Image (cartoon, rainbow, N blue to C red):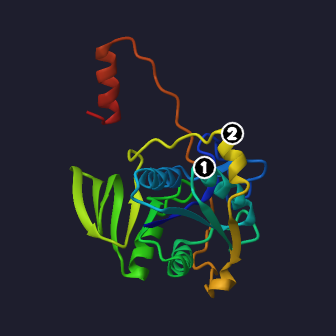
């Protein structure tokens, strides 16, 4: 079985995001970038499937700017076998929209013929949570979202999903698209020897034009602003005073 894992280059989750003074977007100058955490979990799960003998090859693909090579090398160092970079933008501030990404991924799937696509449920930069579902629709494949457990048994994938009421376990026919949630696994750290080996693993570059996909934006971002600053709290001297303050505020 061949597993395809899309990964995205995003601002590192430890970095405090800064908005440009003119509100024209997020400031990416001299900002540490890394693999999207949910995508990293998907890579880890794909590698575990290979280690368990249920997958033969793990392919990672990234769509965006050429700098995403570093993101792909991280996935290769974790244990992926080869990588594909689809250069679809020149400017690092350009975010390819989910529908265009899904169309490009469909083209890659048609070319590589994997039986399973594992992707993060969403990217932490735009929180769209749409690419996996769109890809499933374009392919006509089954899908399972928000996976916290994945078990492959022949041509069936049993997926445990996180839902509002708890956990739901479903069976889907393969080939399938599975989007993974935070509690599926804990990604491994790439060792230094594996980081060195990753530099020699295959990484091919293509463009959106190679797949004849239009990546022109359909959405216009009017403004970007930081969340409002929280007002300072009030220190009270007793429970009675606390209750009185809450009543005045209409909280009780």
Residue 230, placed above or below residue 56: above
Q: Quadrant of the C terminus?
A: top left
Which residue occupies 36% across, 77% down? Answer: 141
Q: Nearer the viewer, residue 197 or 189?
A: 197
Relative image position of residue 45 (x, y in whole percent): 44, 52
Residue furthest bottom as drawn: 212
Percent of width and height locating residue 132: 44, 68
Is residue 32 visible from the viewing direction of this image?
Answer: no
- Indicate which label's residue lies in the foreground, 2 or 1: 2
- Report the number of numbered marks: 2
97 on left or right of 3 = right
Gap in angstroms between the C-alphas marked 2 and 1: 38 Å
Label 2, residues with CA under 10 Å away: few <14, some 14-19, many ≥20: few
Residue 175, x across and y down, in percent: 37, 73
Residue 236: quadrant of the picture? top left
Position of the N terminus, as image quadrant, is bottom left
Helix or strand or loop: what does disc 2 sit on? helix
- The x, y position of residue 97, in whole percent, is 57, 72
134 w.r.t. 240: above or below: below
Q: Could one spot residue 248 in this view of the protein?
A: yes
Nearer-N-terminus badge (2/1): 2
| The quadrant where residue 142 appears | bottom left
Q: Residue at x 41, y 61 (%)?
A: 179
Q: Residue 226 carries which label?
A: 1
Q: Which residue is drawn at 57% across and 51% down?
A: 79
Relative to residue 158, is residue 11 drawn left or right?
right
Provide the residue designation for mark 2.
Answer: 192
Q: Which mark is residue 2?
A: none
User: Counting other residues with Cα less than 10 Å from the Cα at mark 1, is it few (<14), some (14-19), or many (20 or more)?
Assistant: few
- Residue at image point 57% right, 75% down: 219
Q: Do the residues labelled 2 and 1 touch (CB within 8 Å)?
A: no
């Amino acid at each position: 079985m061949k597993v395809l894992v899309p990964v995205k280059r995003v601002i590192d989750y430890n970095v405090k995001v800064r908005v440009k003074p003119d509100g024209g977007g997020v400031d990416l100058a001299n900002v540490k970038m890394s693999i999207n955490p949910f995508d990293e979990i998907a890579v880890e799960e794909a590698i575990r499937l290979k280690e368990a003998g249920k997958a033969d090859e793990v392919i990672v693909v990234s769509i965006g700017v050429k700098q995403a090579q570093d993101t792909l090398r991280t996935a290769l160092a974790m244990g992926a076998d080869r990588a594909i970079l689809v250069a679809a933008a020149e400017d690092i501030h350009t975010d390819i929209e989910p529908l265009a990404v899904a169309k490009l991924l469909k083209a890659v799937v048609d070319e590589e013929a994997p039986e399973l696509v594992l992707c993060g449920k969403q990217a932490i930069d735009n929180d769209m949570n749409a690419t996996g579902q769109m890809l499933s629709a374009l392919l006509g494949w089954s899908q399972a979202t928000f996976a916290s457990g994945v078990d492959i048994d022949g041509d069936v994938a049993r997926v445990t999903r996180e839902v509002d009421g708890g956990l739901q376990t479903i069976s889907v026919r393969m080939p399938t698209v599975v989007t993974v949630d935070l509690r599926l696994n804990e990604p491994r750290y790439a060792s230094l020897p594996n980081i060195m080996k990753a530099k020699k693993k295959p990484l091919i570059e293509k463009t959106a034009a190679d797949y004849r996909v239009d990546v022109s934006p359909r959405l216009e971002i009017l403004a970007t602003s930081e969340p409002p600053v929280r007002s300072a709290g009030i220190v009270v001297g007793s429970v009675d005073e606390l209750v009185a303050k809450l009543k005045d505020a209409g909280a009780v």
